[in-house]
Image (tube, rainbow, N blue to C red):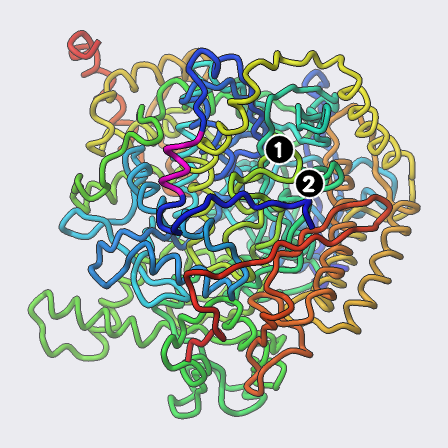
Amino acid sequence: MSTGNMNLTLKVWRQKNTKDKGKMVDYKVSNISPDMSFLEMFDVLNEDLITKGDEPIVFDHDCREGICGMCSMFINGRPHGPKDAVTTCQLHMRSFKDGDTIVVEPWRAKAFPVIKDLTVDRSAFDRVIAAGGFISVNTGNAQDANNLPIPKAQADAAFEAAACIGCGACVATCKNASAMLFVSAKISQLALLPQGQPERYKRVQNMVAQMDAEGFGNCTNTGACEAECPKGISLENIARMNRDYYSAKFVSEEEG
Amino acid sequence: MSAINSNIPEGELTAKWTKFKSSVPLVNPSNKRSLEIIVVGSGLAGASAAATLAEMGYKVKCFCFQDSPRRAHSIAAQGGINAAKNYQNDGDSTYRLFYDTIKGGDYRAREANVHRLAEVSANIIDQCVAQGVPLAREYGGLLDNRSFGGTQVQRTFYAAGQTGQQLLLGAYSALERQIGMGKVEMFTRHEMLEVVKIEGKARGIIARNLITGELERHFGHAVVLGTGGYGNVFYLSTNAMGSNVTAAWKANKQGAFFANPCYTQIHPTCIPVSGDHQSKLTLMSESLRNDGRIWVPKMKDDTRKPQDIPEEERDYYLERRYPAFGNLVPRDVASRAAKERCDAGYGVGASKLAVYLDFKANTERYGRIEASKAGNHNPDKEICMRLGLEVIKEKYGNLFDMYAQITGENPYETPMRIYPAVHYTMGGLWVDYNLMTTVPGLYCTGEANFSDHGANRLGASALMQGLADGYFVLPYTIGAYLSKEISVKAIPTDHPAFAEAEAKAKGILDTLIGIKGTKSVDYFHKKLGLIMWEKCGMARNAEGLRSAIAEIQQLKKDFWSDVRVPGSADEYNPELEKAGRVADFIELGELMCMDALNRNESCGGHFREEYQTEEGEALRDDENYAYVAAWENKGDGTFELHKEELKFENIKIAQRSYK
C-alpha cells in the first residue's frame, strides 16, 4: 500500500519482556514515501510482519500530533530522531535518504525499565508529580480568575515551562539519566506564578526527593536534555529549581 | 417510551440547577469514605471527576489505557475553552452562551443541560487558573480571549494552541495530588472490557492489565465512564490512535442506551490526506479561522500558485454565502461549504480536495497595529508583514510549525491547504440530567455522553463540557444516587456476576486470538473507515446508508473469520487490544448508519442529501424529529429505538441562519 520509493534497513531493539535480555534485529522496508511519518513507516513494517506471521514490534504512540508525549524511540542515537524540536510521530521520512540504515532503540534509563521492544515504563514521572507537582486547591475553592492579574511576561514564562509533554527524551539522552529538566519544568511553572507561592519550597523538596528515590541520575550541566527536548524546555528551569532547592533549606522551617 | 426519563428538575430554566444543588441529598463524610467509585478514563472529564470525588472523600479507582493519565486525548485540543465571563464587555452572558450552544447544535440538545453548562462555565476558568494553568494574558495581566465559530462574542480562553494540554495537565496534577495522598488508586495501561451489573445496578468493571494480559475484577458502588468519543470508527480522524468506543459499547450491551450515534462532527480545517499510508489526520485549530480567510480560485482547475492568483479572482466563499458570520460559521456549515466547492471542481492542491486558509490580510492588519504602537503611523506593507508575522507566530506558532512538519510547506509564506476531517462525536451514551445512563449507577461524562451539543458542537465547547461534567456536575449529581447506597457494603469480587463478566471478556479475547486468519486488524479498520466516510460522512442518503449497512454486516463476518491477531492474550499485545476495539467499532458503525437512516431530516453534522433547502442548507423536520434517538441493544445486531422528545420552552426553535 505504500506509495513512495525509499528502501531502508532498520536495526530495531527486540525484547520480549522486562526479564528478557533483548537484542538488535535487522529489517528491510521498501517503497516508503517521504510524506510518511516515522511511525507510519513502522506501521508498514508491522503490517508486513503480521502478514508473514511474525510478531509486530511494540512501540508506544497515541496522538500522533506531537503533544501526548507517548512516542519514545531512540533513533540513530538521538531521542525522537535527527530533527530538532519534534517528537517521533512528527518526524517524517523526508528527513532520511533512500538506502539509509536506521538504528532504533528504546529510551534507556534505570528509572525507565523496558516493558517490551521499544516500550518503556515511565511511571516514575507520575510519581514525581504526585509528590508535589500541583497547587493544593480543591474544586470549588477558586476566586474569580481576573482577581489575580499576572504580568504577561511572567505568565508566558510559566507557559513555556508548562509546555513539557513528559515524554522522557531528556532522561533518555542524558548520560546520567537525569530527570532534572522534566522536574524543573513543573517546579518552574508553578514557582513563576503567584498561585504557586504558598507551597513553593515544600514542593521543590518533595519533588526532588521523589526524583532521587526513583533512581534518576544527577545533573552535570551537559545540556543534552535541552538540545533534545521536542518542546524546547530551557536549562534555565534547572537553574531555577536549584536556586529554589537551596533556598528551601533556609525557609522550610517558617513554612513548615 | 417510559424507559427513559430525563429527570429534569421542575421550575424555571435559570433556577433548575441552583434548586437541584440545594435540594439534592448529601452523603456525610464518614459514609463517603466507605463508598467506592470507579472512573474509567483520565481525560478532562475523567481526571477532573476522579480528583474532585476524591477531594470530597469518596474512595476512587481511576483507569486509563495510556501509560499515564496525562496522555489522554484531551491533551490534543488546541484552540480554547468557552466561558460566559464577559471579560471583553461585548455583551456575553450565561443566556447567550446557552443560546449559542442550542442554536449551534441545530436545536437538538436538551435545554436544561445546556443552561447548566453555561452556568458553570465561568467556574471552570476560575478553577483552572487557581490550579496554575497558564492561560493567555493581556499586558494588563488579565486573561485574554479569542473568537471561535458560531458566536459573535469573544469568550474563548486559551493557552497558545495548546489549551487542551494545559487544562488536562491541570486536571492531571489535581488527580496526581489525590493519588499521592492515597485517595485515588490509579490503574494505567488498563482497559475496561466489561461493566459488571448486580441486581440491575452497575457494581464494577472487568479491566485488562495491558502489560500482563491479566483480567482484573474491580468493585464500585458506582461506575463513571469518561472514555471519550468514537471518531476512530472512520479509521482516519483527528483522534489519537488509541481512542475507542469499547467502554461505551460494552455499556450499551449491558443496557445503557446509545443516543444519536449519527451525529458526528467533521472539522473544516484539517491537513488534507497525503496518501494511503496515512494513519491519522491533524487538525489546524478553529482559532485560525479567526485570523484567516478561506478561499478557492474562482476559476475551475486553476493550477497557479496561490500567491499568483489576484484578489479579484479569489472566491471567499464563506464570506460570500454567510456575510454575518463569514469565516466564523459553525463547523458543520464550514465543512459542507468546503465539500461543495471541491465537489464542484474548485479544490486546490494535488488531490483537489483542499481549500486555502490564508493569513495575509490579518498579518498585515496586526503589523499595522504593532507599528502604530511603536510610533510608526504610516508603515509600508513590508514593515506591516514583518511585524504582523511576529504576532501570528506568538498566537499560533506551534500550529504553524506542525503544519510545516507534516506538509513540508511553510505556512508563513504560502496559505495553508485544509480539508474537513472527522473530529468529534456529539452522540454517545444517553444520560439523564444527573449524567446517569439507563443503567442505574452507571454514569457517563464528557464526549462519551450525548448530552450537550445536539447535532453539532461549537468550537471550544468540548473542553468546557468535559470539565463542567467532571468538576462541577457529576460530583453533585452522583450524590443523589450514592446517598441511597450508604448501607451497601463493598461486594466481594468472587460474586458470580464478576465471574460471568470476566468469562465473557476472556471468551472474546480467546476467540480473537484463535481465528488465526490472513488479514491484519488494520485491514478491517481501514475498510470500515472507508465505508463510513463515503456513506455516513459529510453527506448521507438513504440508498447509501442501506448499502453501508449491508457492507458492514459482511465486513463483520469477514472480520470474525479472517482476522489475524498474533501473539497470545496473556502478554502485552497491542494487536489484540486493537482487534477488540475494531470489533466494537464495526458494530457501532452499523448502528450509526441505522440512526442516520432513521433520521429523515438534516440537522447539524447529520446532512441527509434528500433534505436540504434550495440554497443547500440543512433542512430540519421539527415536527417529526425533534427527539433524541436512544438505541437499546437487544443483542445479535438488533436495536430498539426509544425517543426522548425535546421541548424548547425558552428558545424559539427556528431555521438556523448565519447569513
Taking the magenta stretch, the answer to whether it contains residue B4 is: no
Q: Which residues are magenta?
A: B17-24
Q: Is residue B113 above or below residue B346?
A: above
Q: Does any portion of residue B169 appear in the rendered image?
A: yes
* Relative depth, front residue between A27 and A172: A172
Q: Position of residue B254 (x, y in %)?
A: 74, 36
Q: Are marks 2 and 1 in contact (CB under 8 Å)?
A: yes
Identity of the residue furthest to the left in this view: B375
Which residue is at a point 37% across and 29% down the rendered structure image?
A181
Q: Does any portion of residue A81 appear in the rendered image?
A: no
Q: Is residue B527 above or below residue B487?
A: below
As helix, strand or loop, the secondary structure at mark 2 comes to loop
* Relative depth, front residue between A28 and B246: B246
Q: Position of residue B518 (x, y in %)?
A: 90, 47
**Mark 1 burial class by Cα count in 10 Å: few <14, some 14-19, many 20+:** many
**Residue identified by numbered label 2:** B256
The picture quadrant where one finds residue B347 is bottom right
Taking the magenta stretch, the answer to whether it contains residue B19 is: yes
Which residue is at a point 6% across and 69% down the rendered structure image?
B375
The residues bearing labels 2 and 1 have C-alpha atoms spaced at a distance of 8 Å
Horizontal side of residue A154 vs B285, given as left or right: left
Q: Are marks 2 and 1 on the same chain?
A: yes
**Which amino acid type corresponds to the residue marked 2 in the rendered image?**
Ala
Q: Position of residue B50 (x, y in %)?
A: 49, 28
Q: Is residue A205 above or below residue B158?
A: above
